[in-house]
Image: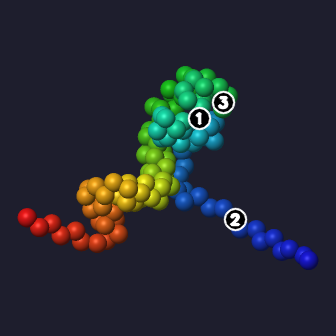
Amino acid sequence: MDKKVITVPIHSDSGLIVSGIYRFSEFMQFAAWFATPRQFRDPQTQKEFAESVGVCEDTLTDWKRHPQFWTLVQQALADWIKDRIPDVVGGLYTKAIEKGNAKEVEMFLRLAGREVNKTK
């Protein structure tokens, strides 16, 4: 049984061009790492990150001054959040079911596009 392999080119969604960065891949990794909330970072510290990608910590400090760094961090954080929305909604659902707290139930219904009628 022969399997056909179809090659599909990968295209970047951002089309971003970053000038003045010698170690572009590491720069992008640093932006993604920096955007990750501290409790989820691996490695944990900036020093450890620098060692893991083979640059000195001063390089990371310089990269944070790059005009496009914070735009990249914002985008990476937005992506991080989007990737976790289903889990947060699942947690909200679980909490609403277990505790029956009105605020969680109301939030869940709003996410579902349901109108919440409040009577006084």
Q: For the residues labelled 3 and 2, say whether their Cβ atoms are less than 8 Å apart.
A: no
Q: Residues within 10 Å of mark 1 (few under 14, many from 20)?
A: few
Q: Which amino acid does the dot numbered 2 rest on?
A: Pro
Distance (Cα) linking label 2 and label 1: 30 Å
Distance (Cα) linking label 1 and label 3: 10 Å
Nearer to us of marks 1 and 3 is: 1
Q: Position of residue 74 (x, y in %)?
A: 43, 46
Q: For the residues labelled 1 and 3, say whether their Cβ atoms are less than 8 Å apart.
A: no
* Tag 2 secondary structure: loop
Nearer to us of marks 2 and 1 is: 1
Say which residue label 1 marks. 42
Which of these two is toward me, 108 or 24? 108
Picture quadrant where residue 43 is located: top right
Q: Residues within 10 Å of mark 3 (few under 14, many from 20)?
A: few
Q: Which amino acid does the dot numbered 1 rest on?
A: Asp
Query: Is 25 displayed left or right of 94 in the figure?
Result: right
Is residue 31 visible in the rendered image? The answer is no
Q: Position of residue 80 (x, y in %)?
A: 49, 49
* Tag 3 secondary structure: helix
Question: Which residue shows up at 91% across the image and 77% down it?
Answer: 1
Say which residue label 2 marks. 9
Say which residue label 3 marks. 52
